[in-house]
Amino acid sequence: TTLFSRYNPRKHPNVSIIEESEKAAHLENLKEFYSRYTFYTEQNIYYRDYYLVWKENGEILAGCQANPEVWELIDYPGSRMNQILMKYGTRLPVVRKIFDPGYQKFIAIEGIWYKEGCEKYLFDIFETACEKHGYNSAVIWLDPKSPIVNKVRSIGRLGIISKLLKPAEGDIRVKFNNYREAEKQVYYEQPAYVSCFDMT
């Protein structure tokens, strides 16, 4: 889990909803981008027209699906430090605006795509999605083996929440019915695509 946050998110003029005429070609870009991933699905791409893109001179340089979500937080497991931060840190106005200890509103990200060298525009897309829905944070679930993880984290400006809370980790469980050993190996070696619908 990678957390992105902005205290006062703003809309970036180069970010817009993908146009209907661009969708088919962009799906081909996504298929190629995730061709070495397991579990890749397009089922939730373009859901409710929440796919945002960064464009220059009519060309899409980066994009992602950005769905608004609300979770009720019953418990926050983890280290003692995380529990202390949840109990006391969220009383600070600067933190509370971004992270409400009872209900967490966030943008759930999937279908990240960028042209090589254009990953820097992703944060502007995340920030625009936050501004559009009146939220202050976004959550991205990525396989640690995915090269996208290092690209996103190398941009560097994830925000205050990523500094306060350690990234949460999880396991992907697979039941291999009638799979040969060679077929199973792909799932251990290749990164998995994680749909935010599976997490929310």
Image (cartoon, grey):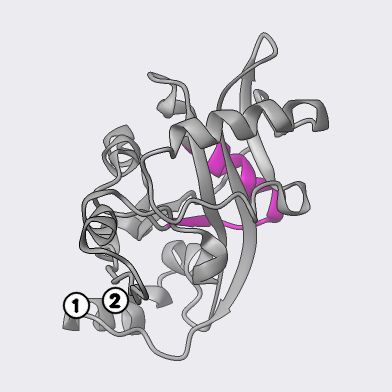
Q: Would you say residue 50 sits in the magenta stretch?
A: no
Q: Which residue is mark 2?
A: 85
In the displayed structure, does residue 105 sit left or right of residue 141?
A: right
Q: Which residues are magenta?
A: 123-140
Measured as percent of width and height from the top left, residue 114 is found at: 48, 28
Q: Are marks 1 and 2 in contact (CB under 8 Å)?
A: yes
The amino acid type found where label 1 is placed reads Met
Against 87, residue 21 (above or below) is: above
Measured as percent of width and height from the top left, residue 188 is found at: 22, 58
Indicate the quadrant where residue 146 lies. Answer: top left
Q: Would you say residue 139 sits in the magenta stretch?
A: yes
The secondary structure making up most of the magenta span is helix
Find the residue positioned furthest to the top. Answer: 57
Against 86, residue 45 (above or below) is: above
The numbered disc on residue 175 is none
The amino acid type found where label 2 is placed reads Leu
Image point 27% across, 53% down: which residue?
Answer: 186
Image point 34% across, 79% down: which residue?
Answer: 86
Measured as percent of width and height from the top left, residue 149 is found at: 30, 44
Q: Please tell me how crowded label 2 is: few (under 14), some (14-19), or many (20+) other residues with Cα within 10 Å.
A: some
Image point 64% across, 48% down: which residue?
Answer: 45
In the displayed structure, does residue 67 sit left or right of residue 99?
A: right
Mark 2 residue element: helix
Measured as percent of width and height from the top left, residue 77 is found at: 29, 85
The numbered disc on residue 81 is 1
